[in-house]
Image (cartoon, rainbow, N blue to C red):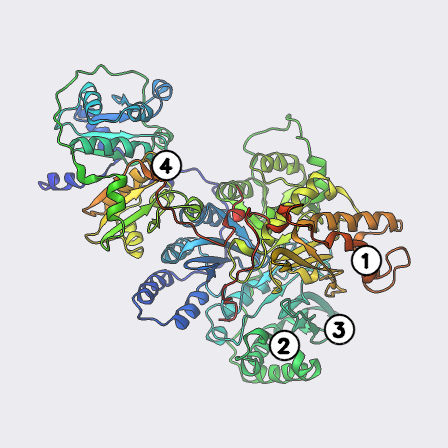
Amino acid sequence: MTVSDLKQSYPDSPKPKINWARNEEAEDFANTVKLFRQGKYDEDSFRRYRLQHGAYGTRMTNDYAMVRIKLPAGEVYPHQLEKISQLSEQFSIGSAHFSTRENIQLHWVILEDVSEILRGLAEVGLTSREACGNSVRNVMCSPLSGVCPDEEFDSTPYALATARFFLRNPMSQSLPRKFKFNFTCCEKHGMVRMVDVGLIPQTRDLDGTIQKGFKIFLGGGLGNKSFVGYQLEEFTPEEDLLNTSIAVIRIFDRLGDRKNMARNRMRYLVNDMGWEKFQNLVLKERAIVRATQSVITRLEVDHTPSIIKRPIRISDESGSSIPDGYTRWLKTNTLKQRQSEYSSVFITLEAGDITSNQITALATIIQEFSSEGHARAGFVQNIALRYVHDDDLPRLYSKLLTFGLAKSGALTMAAPIGCSGTTSCNLALTNSHRLAKEIQRKFLELKLDQDDDLRDSSIKISGCPNACGQHGIATIGFFGGGARVGKEMYPNYQMSLGGRSDGETMLGATCHRIPAKRVIPVILKIIELFKQNKKSDDTLKDWIHRIVNGKEDTEIKSILDMRKALDSFTIPPTKEEDPDFYNDYGSDSSYHTKTGKGECAA
Amino acid sequence: MCSMSQEKTIKTTTGIDSLRSEIRDKSVRVIDVRREEDYKQSHIPTAVNLPLANLLSDDSPERVLKLVKAMGIDDQTPVVVYDDTFGALASRVAWTLEYLGHSDVSLLETTFSKWKSLGLENDNKTPEIQSKEHSIHLKPEILATSDYLETSKDKPDVILIDNRERLNYLEQHIPGAISLPYRTLATQDKILRPKDDMKRLLDNRGISGNSEIITYCGSVGTLSGLAYYALKSVGLPNVKLYVRSFKEWKGLEKPIAKQQDANYWDLSAE
């Protein structure tokens, strides 16, 4: 018996339904690294292998990797978090990162240690397999699926079944490029038009029986060039979900561009071919799949309902007072669920970063407060704790506060996204990651998270044009680059306005180039202009939407007017006047652009 | 059954059960290296107190010899050292005894907190100690000085290991060092991983065979002391501790390497 066997744990804490891991993959990875180091494996094959196993390259070095742990449908259980906490402490930097696609990333891992991480993950049923490379990436699902008041039904079991079907499936090991599925709950909470395959659950009445199905969107995606997806058909019944997925993947596999790395996502294929032609191909291919596939080829959708059981209260603290900030947090971080008396609680992290101690604390907090016994990763580098009984919210807030996890503004504009930028990415031109943190700190300091007019707006930042920070769908989006005054360079961002990913999905309109150190003043200026010109009941998002679409009638009528109003912020001072202007965030030396080779398309 | 003595020569940690029976047999000297006030509150029965700070105030062999004698340790006394800081402080004390020439010294496999959390016996009595005679047979082969390190670190069969946390390593390290953070060495319950586990981890990193291995950390050789014992635990024959570590190296203005052009600190949520 080891000491840990003696550790008290919650006796009936639920366990995940699916084991995503394969034990032998860790050892195979270790051996392959050895062969590669001995020169017995060529660079390109090794890179493909490494990416297939979820280890991505790191900025300016071949000695380190980033390990991307998939959380299919976003689900993560307490014992899995405890393991990830340990692994981040042992093999990474003592912090981990929640991504925008429901992955947890461990950065600056020594390549030779990756196999140890895979081994640890396998112990708790997790994998990083096909988290990178040209495969079906983590299958996402809305963190509100199952609890959303507006959803037709819970799409989580379908997301899990889809993930299970394609993981390690030979069909999807060597696609022209990466391939992404997003399931959601409803129009409002999803990102279904900005992904290769986006799915919204819906039902229809078929002669008195209710039939389940999906609204499927194809060919969207964010990147150097972004496209909005198209709806395949009015209604796709659930029986056709797998047929449709296979048909789309087959067509992409057959016709996708394997040569031009910069344009080989499926959205380019759809765009080049034209939607109608692509749509026809999919429908025909689906008929073939339907007619030819074996009866045993099907999605294993597990409809066993989650057990919802309010954790037993271990100590009674009903007499203790509610700490300051509770009302603010309650307003900006929680949502009422479809199930009465329950709320979903969102934890916002600065640009998705969390310390290993906080992850361990989170594991305990889930056991103590979530009646479903696990957590869900969200779409914006955050975590959701669901099925928290309303009576437990004050106690949960106190607990989160103790561990620095109670930042307010999770569901507001005060929770910006920043990709990893120059902290670890080879392609990055600016420190978008730190900029997102700086904006969040400023917003919270100014209490802008409490402003209802700003609540449904968003800020998203990428460190280069490739859009991992999803700037194209932000109310105010930024992507990084370098600018020059004479011989001097400074970090600069291209700003776009009016992007959104809801039912009226559109890409932001390009507005201006803003120096990194002027981004925060510019955002505050936009808010100020909005306040001066807003109509009653107006939100910043609506106001910007009208400007972008030429429908605003006050001082700022167009993107061009906005541009003029912000001109003064974009003039560079001399280096003598303001030396800090020439440094990026997180750096005290002069800015210069430096990039390595990306390997998203390896 | 009769080959126990063979085992003993490579023993780096002592199990909880063994220590408890050795305490019952009165055949062991237990050293608690925590601060005096912590020791006075409670400690493992029969343990004597040697706070690390006390040792470090003067760790010349002459002084250490005096301390060892006063703790009632002769050349044959088995010594077990423990702390409450994942074995790092205990390692530094154990290494110092080893350097003096005391061969039978090992680390308790767990920390005092773990010991207590298991409900094992502890008391607050300071034992009465009869001072004993001890010889000096210094073991320079387990010590690395800055001069030694400078001349040997670039040799092909020398491996230099930095045991500080990853971000500190990325920021600055001794050129040629590889990073093996001290956290990597432990499990949840024990200060060192099981032997097979440790061996696999080190093999992956190319730390094996007959290479000379030198460990260092931030300032006084605690984290790297733990690594010293981790390496010994898998039977690596030639391990040295650069006991004055990075603090001295930096103070002497010797060359330093850095991972350039990346803002890795901004990934930390600390």
Which label number is shown at residue A268? 2
Which residue is disc 1 drawn over?
A: A564
Cα–Cα gap, marks 1 and 4: 54 Å
Q: Where residue B209 sits in the image (x, y, percent)?
A: 20, 54
> Which of label 2 and label 4 is nearer to you?
4
| Amino acid type at image mark 3 | Asp
Q: How many marks?
A: 4
Looking at the rendered structure, the secondary structure element under dot 1 is: helix
> Which of label 2 and label 3 is nearer to you?
2
Looking at the rendered structure, the secondary structure element under dot 3 is: loop
Q: Residues within 10 Å of mark 4 (few under 14, many from 20)?
A: few
| Amino acid type at image mark 4 | Gly
Indicate the chain on which mark 4 is placed. B
Which residue is disc 4 drawn over?
A: B251
Q: Is residue A196 above or below residue A110?
A: below
Which label number is shown at residue B23? none
Which residue is disc 3 drawn over?
A: A207
Indicate the chain on which mark 3 is placed. A
